[in-house]
Image (cartoon, rainbow, N blue to C red):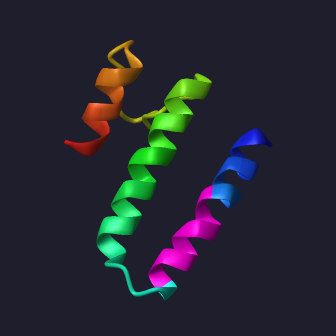
Amino acid sequence: MLALFIDLAVTIPVDDFIIQEYKAAEVLLTTDISLLSIIGLLGKQVLTSSITSTGNTVTDFVVKFV
């Protein structure tokens, strides 16, 4: 439930930035990195079940983007 509130708190400013005609790719990439970081800090699983975890949240975060 906490993740839902965090997602809403991030989505509202993203909508505002896109409406203000910021580059959508940059805004969405920053949002994705922010949400993945928050998920890692909350101790949730960053990778899907089909990808083997390295056991470290930081390296899992890097593997997600490679």
Dividing the picture into quarters, in which one does residue 23 lie? bottom left
Q: Is residue 39 left or right of residue 48?
A: right
**Residue under the point 39% across and 47% down:** 33
Residue 63 screen position, x and y as percent: 26, 33
* Residue in the foreground of this view, choosing between 28 and 16: 16
Q: Is residue 65 left or right of residue 9?
A: left
Residue 65 screen position, x and y as percent: 26, 44
Residue 52 can be seen in this image: no
The total number of labels drawn is 0
Is 19 drawn above or below residue 2 in the view shown?
Answer: below
Q: What is the magenta segment's predominant secondary structure?
A: helix
In the image, is residue 15 part of the stretch drawn in magenta? yes
**Residue under the point 34% across and 59% down:** 29
**Residue under the point 64% across and 54% down:** 7
Give the residues in magenta. 10-18
Is 7 drawn above or below residue 41 in the view shown?
Answer: below
Residue 49 can be seen in this image: yes
Q: Is residue 8 left or right of residue 16?
A: right
Residue 32 screen position, x and y as percent: 42, 53
